Image (cartoon, helix red, strand yellow):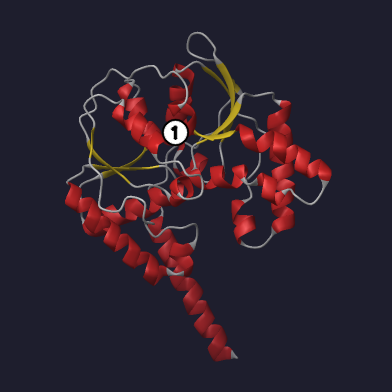
């Protein structure tokens, strides 16, 4: 028994070290807005709720800041509700469906009460779970009615911006970019064209596809921790394809992918930045 326990501790210790190695440099400030309502810049055309999530506010607050600027620039009054909670994705993946259902009910209620036109999310993993609340909340008539009203409001930020009249970015962004299609965006939500349409609007930006942009980078939620060897092989293959494009910027749409690709850049010695799609659009507006 002692030998087994010792082996388990070594395994857990190794996984913890790998997880810590993936963490980016922690930002000086987290995303903690002092107000809930951010007015549109100019005429208000939409009232949208912003789903902030659990990871992005702490690891990638700059992505949230860019998202708010871009939404407001395009006529959105943005509501950041303090009552919102985790989307429930990790609970669903772990089989904790009752906890996930309670989180889903709370999120659906607070956003519906805010009377928003859309619930915009910039983390593809969260977005796919939010859109699946109809499946999660299917055991009672009241829950089904709640989910039926909420789920259609959920829009990935790429999806939302691509379907509204977008103010044209005018600032030159001289980047050679390759796009990693986050699995939760392209496979779970079936969104592929929208990010490319937005990138095509940015002056000076050159988009060069890697050989297999829709193949997993190896992050896959916690797969990179639970299956590190396979995850590492997927990442190595991905970085070979990235290098072949000659890109100086890798663009994606999910925090897990951002983390994984940043690790790939460090390990491969490449000189490349990893960015969210909305950050490049924000650059095109001259905001960064």
| Residue displayed at 39% across by 65% down | 231
For the N terminus, the quadrant is bottom right
Asked if residue 280 can be seen in this view, the reply is yes
| Residue displayed at 34% across by 18% down | 168
Between 134 and 236, the residue placed more toward the observer is 134
Up-down: is 126 above or below 3? above
> In terms of secondary structure, where does tag 1 sit?
helix
Between 228 and 205, the residue placed more toward the observer is 205
Between 248 and 244, the residue placed more toward the observer is 244
For the C terminus, the quadrant is top left
Up-down: is 96 above or below 101? below
Instruction: State the image coordinates of residue 75 (x, y, percent, origin top left).
Output: 50, 15
Instruction: State the image coordinates of residue 222 (x, y, percent, origin top left).
Output: 50, 61
| Residue displayed at 51% across by 8% down | 43
Asked if residue 83 can be seen in this view, the reply is no
Left or right relative to 287: residue 240: left
The image quadrant of residue 44 is: top right
Badge 1 local density, few (<14 within 10 Å), some, or many (20+)? many
Between 114 and 33, the residue placed more toward the observer is 114
Left or right relative to 75: residue 83: right
Left or right relative to 259: residue 132: right
The image quadrant of residue 118 is: top right
Q: Which residue is mark 1?
A: 158
Instruction: State the image coordinates of residue 123 (x, y, percent, origin top left).
Output: 49, 42
| Residue displayed at 40% across by 41% down | 192
Instruction: State the image coordinates of residue 284 (x, y, percent, origin top left).
Output: 31, 24
């Amino acid at each position: 028994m002692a030998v087994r326990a010792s082996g388990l501790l070594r395994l857990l210790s190794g996984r913890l070290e790998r997880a810590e190695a993936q963490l980016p440099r922690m930002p000086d400030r987290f995303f903690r807005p002092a107000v809930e309502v951010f007015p549109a810049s100019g005429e208000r055309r939409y009232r949208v709720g912003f789903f902030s999530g659990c990871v992005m506010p702490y690891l990638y607050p700059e992505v949230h800041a860019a998202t708010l600027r871009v939404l407001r620039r395009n006529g959105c009054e943005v509501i950041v509700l303090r009552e919102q909670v985790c989307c429930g994705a990790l609970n669903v993946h772990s089989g904790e469906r009752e906890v996930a259902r309670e989180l889903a009910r709370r999120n659906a209620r607070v956003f519906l009460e805010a009377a928003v036109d859309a619930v915009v999310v910039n983390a593809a993993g969260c977005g796919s779970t939010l859109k699946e609340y109809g499946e999660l909340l299917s055991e009672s008539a009241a829950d089904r009615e709640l989910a039926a009203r909420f789920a259609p409001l959920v829009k990935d930020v790429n999806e939302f911006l691509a379907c509204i009249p977008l103010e044209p970015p005018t600032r030159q962004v001289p980047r050679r970019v390759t796009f990693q299609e986050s699995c939760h965006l392209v496979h779970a939500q079936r969104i592929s064209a929208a990010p490319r349409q937005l990138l095509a609007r940015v002056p000076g930006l050159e988009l060069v596809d890697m050989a297999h942009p829709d193949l997993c980078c190896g992050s896959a939620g916690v797969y990179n921790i639970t299956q590190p060897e396979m995850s590492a092989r997927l990442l190595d293959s991905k970085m070979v394809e990235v290098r072949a494009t000659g890109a100086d910027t890798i663009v994606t749409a999910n925090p897990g992918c951002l983390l994984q690709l940043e690790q790939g850049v460090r390990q491969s010695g490449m000189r490349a930045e990893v960015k969210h799609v909305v950050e490049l659009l924000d650059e095109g507006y001259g905001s960064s």
